[in-house]
Structures are given as structure tokens and as C-alpha cells.
Image (cartoon, helix red, strand yellow):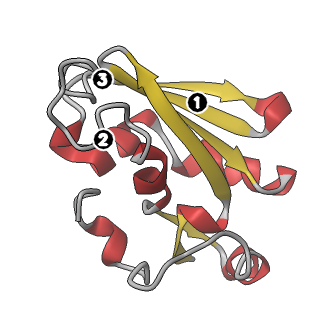
Amino acid sequence: MTRIALARLAHARSGDKGNSANVGLIAYRPDLFPILEREVTAERVKAHFGSLVEGEVDRYELPNLHALNFVLHGALDGGGTVSLRTDAQGKVLSSALLRMEVEVDAVVAESVAGLGRVPAGWEPGSADRHPEG
């Protein structure tokens, strides 16, 4: 098994829902969806974001779309109209989630090597840092 950035397996979109953020995670290929189901749990997402998410994290599965949807409660410091955060609508939370590392076997890691956009500094081990850097 090897660790790779989630960005190699999926793309994501995020936005605001009041004081909560919504993050959709979509597998690049149908065969990658079971890895997302196994590796990207609500608990791991909550741990990945740490104190940035004050409430619970709910996970919804959309197998027909090969996607997962996460609702991060209390992630926007009160919401877009009252938050003093730089990203009051949670638009960059999808990119932050894609930094999370997941375990895959070597064959999968090799097959996804060219997928996704993985900036410099996202080598194994760097995703353990807080999403804000």
C-alpha cells in the first residue's frame, strides 16, 4: 500500500449553506469510487479539517454518480454575511479536501499517476498539515 493525494482519485466542488459548507467529491473513474467509499469517511474528513469545522460532518453517498457529498456543519464561522474569514463561502474547502492522503495499492497508484492536478509540495506526508497551511 502507498499513500497518495486524494486529488489523484477525484475532483471536488464546494460552497456555502449558511454556516455549513458542502463539499462534493467525484471519482475520476468508476473503478476509483470504492476507494473513496473506503478511505474518505466522515470521521477522516472531520479530522482532516480539524478545528476549522466546529460541528459534525455528514457523508452522503451517490453511487450512481461515483461521488460522495459532505456537509461540514459549523465550518464557515457564522456564514458568508457575518464571517470575517477570507473564504466565508467555503469555496476553497474542496481544494483543501483534495490534499487529504489515502492508501491505495501500487497498481492503483501507478494507474492514477497522471490524473488530477497535484501542485508541488503535495508529496506524501505533506497533507498531514492543517488545510490552511
Q: In this view, does 68 lie to the left or right of 130?
A: right
Q: At 29% across and 18% down in the image, what residue appears?
A: 19
Q: In this view, does 91 lie to the left or right of 12?
A: left
On screen, 42 above or below 96?
Answer: above
Residue 57 found in image quarter: top left
**Residue type beneath disc 3:** Gly
Residue under pointer 3: 80
Type of residue at label 2? Asp
Left or right: where 31 falls relative to 101 = right
Point out which mark residue 47 bears: none
- Dot 2 corresponds to which residue? 87
User: Of circles 1 and 3, which is in front?
Assistant: 3
In the image, residue 1 lies at what x, y percent?
A: 57, 77
Q: Where is residue 92 in the image (x, y as percent from the top left)?
A: 41, 48
**Residue marked by disc 1:** 69
Q: Residue at x 79, y 78 (%)?
A: 111
Q: Position of residue 41 (x, y in %)?
A: 48, 40
The amino acid on which the numbered mark 1 sits, given as a three-letter code, is Asn
For label 1, the SS is strand
Judging from the image, what secondary structure is the residue with disc 3 in?
Answer: loop
Marks 2 and 3, how far apart at CA: 8 Å
The quarter of the picture where the C terminus appears is bottom left
Q: Nearer the N terminus, badge 2 or badge 1?
A: 1
